[in-house]
Image (cartoon, helix red, strand yellow):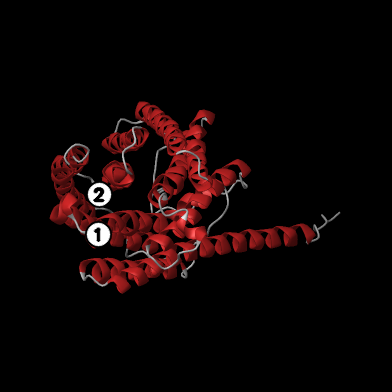
Amino acid sequence: MTTRPAVAGPSPVAGPSPVAGPSPRRFALLALAALSLLAGLLGALALLGVSTSEATTRFAGSHGLLMTLGFLGTVIALERAVALGRRWGYVAPLAAGLAGLGLVIGIPAVAAAALLAVASYTYLLMYIVFLAMDRGLHTWVQAVGALGWILAAALLLVGRPVADVVPALAVFLILTVAGERLELARLGRLTGRMRGLFLLAAGTFVAGALLATVASDAGLRLGGLGLLGLAAWLARFDIARRTVRIPGVTRFIAVCLLAGYVWLAVGGAAWLAYGASAPALARDAMLHALFLGFVISMVFGHAPVILPAVLRVPLPYRPRFYAHFLLLQAGLVVRVVVGDIGGRTEAWQVGGVLTVLALLLFVGSSAAAAIGEVQARRRITAAARARPTPSRPG
C-alpha cells in the first residue's frame, strides 16, 4: 500500500516526513479545526462553572461536538485526505470544519448535522479506496471506526441529544487509533491468537456501542468490557513497550501512548461500573478519561510526526513537549480521580482548568517549535547563498 491511512502518522520509530513547503489550503482547513478547538475550550470553562461570560456560555451546549468532530474529526479527515492524495477526499475535512464553524456562529443544529453527515460519508469513501489498496485487519478496523462517525451524524440528524451520540463517537475515535496501533503491532509478529483477542475486545466494544443506541445501560456496560479488553491488549502488544527505551521523540510518543492506555482502561471501567445510571461526576469520568485521557494523549504524542506530513511544515521534537503532556495528565488525575471519583467538586474544576491549559500550551509550544525551525532553516539557507562560490583554478 503506497499511501497508508494512519491516525498517528508513520511508525513512531520513524522521523518526521520530509518537508516540501507549506500548504495554504491545508493550513486553512487546520484553522477551521483550531477554531472549533478554541470554542470548545471556552465552552468547557462554562461547563466547569469557572466562567459565566457570554463568550464562554454560548459554546457550552456544543462543547462535545466542537471537540470531537469539529476539531478531531477535521484533523483526522485531513490526514486521511493527504494520505489518499485525491482532491475529493478533502470534502471530508472541509465539511467537518464548516460544521464546527457553523456551531460557533450558531447555525441550526440540523444544518451542522447535515455537514457532519457529508463529512462522514466522504470519510468512509476514502476507506473504501484504502481497503482496495490494503485489506489488512487494521484497515477494516479503522473502516468500522468510520461507520461510527456515520452513525453519530445520523443520530444527530434525527434529533438525538449529544449524550446519546457519545458511544458512536467513541467507536470512531477509539477504533481509528486502535486500528493504527494494530498495524504497527504487526512489527512484533502477531499470532492468530493475538488477532483473535483483539477482535474479541473490539467486537465487544462495538456491540456495546450499538446496543447503547436502544438500551443505553446494557450497551454502555458491555462496551466498557470491550474497552477494558482493548486497553489490556494495547498495553500488552503495542510496540510502545519497546520503543519507550529509545530517547527523543520516539520515547515521547511511547510515553503518551502508554499513558493513553491507562485512561482507556479507566474509561472502560467507568462504563462497566456505572452504565447509563451514572451520577453527574461519574459521567464526567466516563467521558473525559476516554476523550481527553486517551484521545488527546494520542494527539500530543504524534503531533511531531503527523503535522509535518500534513502541513509540510517542520515540527521538531523538543523536550519541553513533556510540559503539556504532564499538565494534561496532572489535570486528569485531579479531575477524574480526586474530583469525579472522590466527589470533590473543587478538584473537578481545578483539574478541568488544567486540561484546558494543557491543550492551549500544546498549541502554543507546537507553534513556537515550528516557527523557530522554519526561521532557523531560512537563516541557514540565507547564509549558504551569501557564501562566495569558490573559483576553479586555471
Q: Amino acid at mark 1?
A: Ala
Q: Which mark is residue 280?
A: 1
Q: Nearer the viewer, residue 61 or 311?
A: 61
- Name the residue tied to disc 2: 188
User: Quick one: which residue is furthest to the right in this view?
Assistant: 394
Is 243 rendered above or below residue 91? below
Q: Residues within 10 Å of mark 2 (few under 14, many from 20)?
A: few
Q: Quadrant of residue 6?
A: top left
Query: Considering the numbered disc 1 on the image, is that residue within a helix, a strand or a loop?
Result: helix
Q: Amino acid at mark 2?
A: Gly
Q: Position of residue 190 (x, y in %)?
A: 21, 44
Is 150 rendered above or below residue 363? above
Q: Quadrant of the C terminus?
A: bottom right
Q: Earlier in the sequence, mark 1 or mark 2?
A: 2
The number of discs equals 2
User: As drawn, is 357 to the left or to the right of 141?
Assistant: right
Query: Considering the numbered disc 2 on the image, is that residue within a helix, a strand or a loop?
Result: helix
Q: Position of residue 322 (x, y in %)?
A: 42, 69
Q: Quadrant of residue 255?
A: bottom left
Disc 1 and disc 2 in contact, CB within 8 angstroms: no
